[in-house]
Image: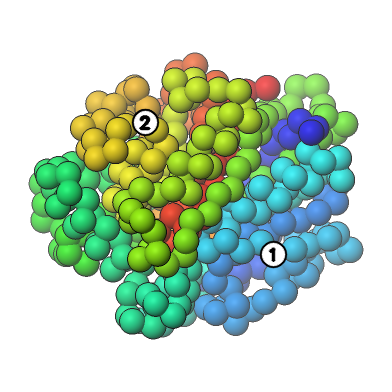
Amino acid sequence: MNTVYITGIGQVAVGEHWEKTLAALSTTAIRAALKDAGSPQPEIVYIGNFLASSLSHQANLGALVCDAAGLNGVEGTTVEAGEASGAAALHMGCLAIGSGLVDCVVVVGVEKMTDMVGTQVEAFAAQSGDYDFETMQGLTPTGMAGLLMQRYLDQTQAPRDAFSVFPITAHRNGVNNPYAMYRKAIDLEAYHKAPLVSAPLTLYDVPSYADGAAALVLVSQNLLRDGQKAVIVSASEIATDTLAVHDRSDPLAFEAVHISTANALEKAGLTRDCLDLFECWDTPSIYGMLSLEAGGFAERGQGWQFATPENLALTGRLPVATMGGIKAHGFAPGAAGIYQVLDAVQQLRGEAGQNQIAGAQIVMTQALSAAAASAITHIIRKA
């Protein structure tokens, strides 16, 4: 396999962009990424998107996005994997470069959540779960996360406050990210005061849907230029579990996370101790906890003992949500997996400002769809 380099990044601040179309959001991110990469000519554009055909009433994003970005004639394809669609698009880009098919790919994740308001948004978002056995029964993504958190609390006897570390860490780190939707720190008192949304989940345990777009430029060594701020994608791995959670022997095991993590580390020739930070799926907060356990960073049922503010801080054993994560960044589902990788690239380039992890060399990112029905893991390192 050829080495895959990321040479350009571009993003739109996550938020409510009522005045902008889906195409306008993706174009802004793509053009910024191409400019950052030195304006190469992409041969393929992969678009990660989950809900455009439902919320924006727009399919055929390959043509729409390429046309809007001035890339007429370029191959464009939409990649869908629920909330992990952006990461899945990156996986396709890595395959295209790694196989030698092409030398330059643009990957963009985009979502326009404000094209629809009301309860229908949550109904469409629930499409990432099993429609027949979950969605049709009224179970939403938030409802599923609430059930899993309650099961975890019952089985492990973990203190309820153990989950506060994920939103508190994310919001603290989001303060210094100009592209984050929530740039205000919270503390344990604020966490306690947050209203319930799906017991035992509170408002700070769940993501806030928003609009966003983020893009990456991938190239082979053939197009790599001297002096470029390139980083290397050492591994790109996808694993799946049963879509219906009730079909799993253990709903808290997150087997797809376990497989995807193990395969990525093996492909990269690394151990967990080599990682300088982990951009995990930090919200709903129960998913961050279960990812630490399934990924092998903590023993089963003991993730809450590992996930302390000290361990997950910017100076800790395993920093997470270093630029605000999904919780503080805001949740644009189709773009979330790309924002994770973009944050990782900034860390490896030394461009994370006050949130910079000293000496960061190797980063792992992981995007989930539904209740970890799919887990997409990338390991990225300095060139």
381 up-or-down from 42: above or below: above
The reply to whether residue 67 is visible in this rendering is: yes
Compared with 59, 109 (above or below) is above
Up-down: is 187 above or below 182?
above
Q: At label 1, which amino acid type do we have?
A: Thr
Who's the residue at 69% across and 64% down the image?
A: 78
Please provide percent x and percent y for residue 329. Answer: 41, 50
> Relative to residue 3, is residue 147 depicted above or below?
below
Residue 79 location (% of width, % of height): 66, 61
Q: Quadrant of residue 181?
A: bottom left
Name the residue carrying label 1. 78
In front of the other: 204 or 96: 96
113 or 5: nearer the eye?
A: 5
User: Secondary structure under badge 1?
Assistant: strand
| Lower sequence index among marks 1 and 2 | 1
Image check: 175 left or right of 107?
left
Identity of the residue drawn at 46% across and 45% down: 257
Q: Which residue is mark 2?
A: 297
